[in-house]
Image (cartoon, rainbow, N blue to C red):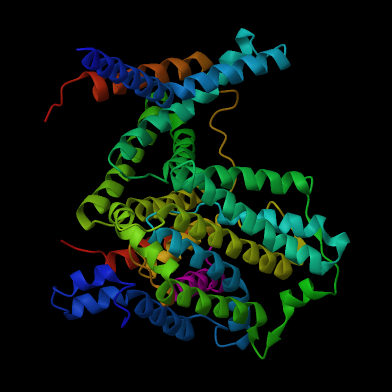
């Protein structure tokens, strides 16, 4: 009887410990983020002001969108090196499409990015080449294409044009919520 | 390969009929290299000049060194993304320690590479961080430290002494650095194919679990592999610095890790681990260097050259894909 109780206690202790370790491993990045933010707030007095935080979140929303895509690729055990170059090509395409309206500027990079991703995916799935190499080749090719398209200089889309900064935050939040729901909350559709 | 222990997975491959398609796949890098050289001899103006060989080999020597370390890391089913930045850090250390004498600064440069490699190996073996992540953080950190050490500026080397000598010395048209890199490749091949630690590394790549259950010191082996990769990157940094005639933390080794990975994989070291081809890696490096030289010598703009290079890498890999 007592032996059983002891065993149960031991078991619950170890599982508590395992749960704690698991929690730290899963949520540790949030802890680090909070610590870094508090230290930065203590060292730089302006760090925790709303304007600065908004700037940081705006800058982070671009990276966040790229990271969502990368998450799906890594879940499959793959890797996509080409995303940075695709962002570069996307900016060039958007700048060229902007004179034709903001819908074109929005659609062109998305369509081209999807096509490039599809080609990468087909090469990986059909020919069984390593994702690392296929996307490494895409990294080189997209970077070359972006620089060539831009005529080895900068493309100024429209003098004075810039999207309001909350737009980046809102769209990144909306898109990541959709993917969160799709990945973790929806039953598989297959 | 007569040494069956080093290539355990090849025995399984023997069941397949060794048709002509099979031999094309396993030797695609040599065919591609030969085809490219023949094409260049016919098409590219000035390719017959012996100075081209000299220049190509000077460029190839550091890339070959890091590609060797890379191929072993890939053989253990890992990867070492830090090599390019470690070259830059080694270059910076050579620069700041010049006042102690070139012998010391040469040793410190190589030692820096070794220290980075050991740090990377300990992160992977002791803290069990994924090689991709640990070497990625080292890529960022080593480049930053290299720039900080020299204040972001380049530092010219003196005109004479052992380091500038390395940057120009040659036997007829063969650079001394290329000879050293080739000797290093020979020693490397011996370690990988004929010694216990080399076998351990390849086994760890073929099946980490089986290697562990067989009682092999898997983590120690991994620390050794990444330490070796760092050491080779340190020497590569020295060679690149000597050739450039300056310690330059912004220029040396940028994206070299990608060339090294591409060379190793094109040479027949699959990213799935458990196999390594040293001769293939040598020719993979030569192939990429000749490719770069062909673009430059035919006056193809660097932007289109990148696209063509990408197509070439995919093509070479497509030829040797492991079907079914």
The answer to whether B86 is drawn above or below residue A27 in the figure is below
Residue B95: x and y, percent?
79, 58
Relative depth, front residue between B312 and B190? B190
Quadrant of residue B19 within the rendered picture = bottom left
Residue at the front extreme of this rendering: A2
Quadrant of residue A5 within the rendered picture = top left
Q: Residue at x 20, y 76 (%)?
A: B21
The answer to whether A63 is drawn above or below residue A5 in the figure is below
Quadrant into which the N terminus of chain A falls: top left
Residue A3: x and y, percent?
24, 17
Q: Which residue is drawn at 30% across and 60% down?
A: B206
Residue B313 seen in this snapshot: yes
The answer to whether A45 is drawn above or below residue B41 in the figure is above
The answer to whether A158 is drawn above or below residue A10 in the figure is below
Relative depth, front residue between B71 and B117? B117
Q: Which residue is drawn at 34% across and 68% down?
A: B316
- Say if the magenta span includes residue A31: no
Residue A81: x and y, percent?
42, 46
- Provide the major secondary structure of the magenta segment: helix
Q: Residue at x 64, y 54 (%)?
A: B115
Residue at the right extreme of this rendering: B99
- Say if the magenta span includes residue B286: yes
Residue A175 seen in this snapshot: no
Residue A61: x and y, percent?
47, 23
Residue at the top extreme of this rendering: A50
Which range of residues does the magenta coloring cover?
B281-301
Q: How many marks?
A: 0
Relative depth, front residue between A119 and A126? A126
């Amino acid at each position: 009887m007592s032996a059983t109780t002891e065993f149960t206690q031991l078991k619950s202790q170890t599982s508590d410990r395992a749960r704690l370790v698991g929690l730290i491993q899963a949520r540790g990045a949030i802890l680090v983020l909070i610590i870094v933010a508090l230290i930065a707030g203590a060292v730089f007095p302006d760090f925790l002001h709303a304007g600065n935080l908004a700037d940081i979140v705006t800058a982070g929303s671009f990276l966040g969108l790229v990271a969502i895509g990368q998450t799906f690729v890594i879940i499959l055990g793959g890797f996509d090196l080409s995303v940075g170059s695709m962002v570069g090509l996307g900016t060039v395409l958007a700048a060229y499409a902007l004179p034709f309206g903001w819908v074109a500027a929005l659609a062109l990079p998305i369509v081209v990015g999807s096509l490039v991703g599809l080609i990468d995916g087909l090469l990986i799935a059909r020919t069984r080449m390593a994702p690392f190499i296929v996307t490494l080749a895409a990294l080189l090719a997209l970077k070359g294409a972006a620089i060539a398209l831009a005529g080895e200089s900068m493309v100024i889309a429209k003098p004075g044009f810039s999207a309001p900064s909350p737009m980046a935050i809102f769209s990144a939040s909306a898109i990541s919520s959709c993917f969160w729901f799709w990945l973790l909350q929806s039953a598989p559709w297959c | 390969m007569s040494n069956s222990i080093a290539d355990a997975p090849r025995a399984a491959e023997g069941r397949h009929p060794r048709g002509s398609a099979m031999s094309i796949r396993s030797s695609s890098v040599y065919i591609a290299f030969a085809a490219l050289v023949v094409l260049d001899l016919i098409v590219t103006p000035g390719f017959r000049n012996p100075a081209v060989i000299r220049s190509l080999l000077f460029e190839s020597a550091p890339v070959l060194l890091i590609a060797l370390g890379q191929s072993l890391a890939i053989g253990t089913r890992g990867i070492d993304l830090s090599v390019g930045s470690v070259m830059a850090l080694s270059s910076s250390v050579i620069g700041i320690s010049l006042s102690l004498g070139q012998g010391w600064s040469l040793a410190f440069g190589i030692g820096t590479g070794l220290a980075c490699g050991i740090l990377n190996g300990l992160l992977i073996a002791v803290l069990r961080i994924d090689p991709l992540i640990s070497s990625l953080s080292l890529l960022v950190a080593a480049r930053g430290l290299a720039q900080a050490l020299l204040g972001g500026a380049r530092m010219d080397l003196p005109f004479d002494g052992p380091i500038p000598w390395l940057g120009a010395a040659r036997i007829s048209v063969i650079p001394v650095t290329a000879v050293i890199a080739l000797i290093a490749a020979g020693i490397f091949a011996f370690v990988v194919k004929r010694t216990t630690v080399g076998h351990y590394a390849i086994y760890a790549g073929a099946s980490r679990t089986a290697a562990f259950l067989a009682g092999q010191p898997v983590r120690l082996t991994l620390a050794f592999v990444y330490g070796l990769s760092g050491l080779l990157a340190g020497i590569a940094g020295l060679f690149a610095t000597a050739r450039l005639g300056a310690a330059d933390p912004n220029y040396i080794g940028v994206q070299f890790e990608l060339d090294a990975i591409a060379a190793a994989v094109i040479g027949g070291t699959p990213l799935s681990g458990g196999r390594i081809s040293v001769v293939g890696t040598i020719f993979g490096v030569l192939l990429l260097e000749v490719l770069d030289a062909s673009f430059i010598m035919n006056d193809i703009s660097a932007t289109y050259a990148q696209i063509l290079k990408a197509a070439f890498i995919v093509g070479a890999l497509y030829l040797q894909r492991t079907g079914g």
